[in-house]
Amino acid sequence: MKFATKALHAGVEPDPTTGAIMTPIYQTSTFVQASPGNHKGYAYARGKNPTRNQLEKNIAALENAKHGLCFSSGMGATDAVIKLLRPGDEVITGDDLYGGTYRMFTKVFANYGIKFHFINLTDVNNISKYINEKTKLIWVETPTNPTMQVVDISACSVIAKKHGCVLAVDNTFASPYLQNPIDMGADIVMHSVTKYLGGHSDVIMGALCMNDDKLHEQLAFIHNSCGATPGPMDSFLVLRGIKTLHLRMERHCFNGRKIAEFLKSHPKVDKVYWPGFAEHPNHEIAKKQMRDFGGMISFDIKSKSKEDAFKIASSVKVFSLAESLGGVESLVNHPATMTHASVPADERARVGVTDSLLRLSVGVEDIDDLLEDLKQALG
Ligand SMILES: *Cc1c(COP(=O)(O)O)cnc(C)c1O
């Protein structure tokens, strides 16, 4: 099945009792048993819920994976992956991560004796300096948030396999429409479903996809034991959102390209971070592993002034100033004080997250209105 057909139909069955074409919202915590243990596969809704099940099958199909697990947030999904580890284990990850991921690694799991190496993964050769027999996980985000670094997933997978460690890829920015890490050898794909998959800024959710049965069994055990599982109403909303994922992504990419080009030619704009530009440091890798370049763009302004950046962020009218991304509406964000405030200033400076950097999540509005809005805001 092709992507668009899978988005609508994969994993989704009409309701067996009524024929309802839309997956019912099984708003129940428990399921009646005929005699102890004699049930229809559902016992208690933390472990398994029919609405969530259909969504898990659907997301797994979009990632060409055998198994899917949905979590009550993206962070809940990441948390489950790190719980595969033991004290003394080491993780190699990127130096430009989603702020919440960096916070969880450094402020939560570092206290449990897990060591994290934050390195520049845009050149995978850097991994060899840090990998050893204690390395159990390589955690990759690509493209990265907010500087749109691109990491070669296939090359990471070769290294992970050689050293017997798990490769997990945070695929939130690309969405399964643009990139399928499992096809490139990743063991686990993580999503903040909150973003493009949900797509309508109305749900917080996360997901993990994997092929390996044993890995699925371990993660499903953590999923049920630790309990970061989403409710059926949210699962329904995401199933509904995914039915237009391919249509939304097409427009996100179209609008994203126009805005990236506009910003690049604007006299007040300094640097534009977007993997679709030929001069992007890993453009060739982006071309190889992504189907298009998406609607996430960051840019720095020539004045380098935080006040000027704040002025732009507060004078937009069609864009809204807000955290998050991947919804139908266009958003602007000031990473240094919003999404990446939990990353120390020197770490931020090292990867280009300056006080004058702005990040755009380009939505699916009419491109003329978006361009007009940025024109007036930049002044
Ligand atoms: C938002 C986000 C997360 C965290 O997901 P939540 O659903 O907010 O918990 C993780 N990674 C990336 C790249 C994100 O953008």
Image (tube, helix red, strand yellow):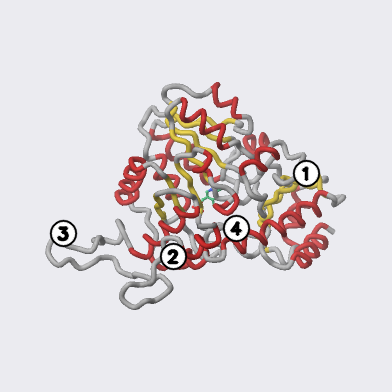
Looking at the rendered image, the quarter that the C terminus falls into is bottom right
Q: Answer few, some or many: residues within 10 Å of disc 3's Cα (few below 14, many 20 plus, some between 14 and 19).
A: few
For image coordinates 34% across by 50% down, the residue present is 223
Q: Which residue is mark 4?
A: 326
The disc, 3 or 2, on the residue closer to the chain's N-terminal end is 3
Q: Nearer the viewer, mark 1 or mark 3?
A: 3
Left or right: 85 as drawn, with respect to 32: right
248 shown above or below 61:
below
Q: Nearer the viewer, residue 288 or 363?
A: 288
The disc, 1 or 2, on the residue closer to the chain's N-terminal end is 2
Q: Nearer the viewer, mark 4 or mark 1?
A: 4
State the image quarter where residue 354 is shown. Answer: top right
Circle 4 — which element?
Answer: loop
Circles 1, 2 touching at the beta carbon (< 8 Å): no
Circle 1 — which element?
Answer: strand
Circles 3, 2 touching at the beta carbon (< 8 Å): no
The disc, 1 or 3, on the residue closer to the chain's N-terminal end is 3
Q: Nearer the viewer, residue 187 or 143?
A: 187
Q: Nearer the viewer, mark 3 or mark 2?
A: 3
Circle 2 — which element?
Answer: helix
Q: Answer few, some or many: residues within 10 Å of disc 2's Cα (few below 14, many 20 plus, some between 14 and 19).
A: some
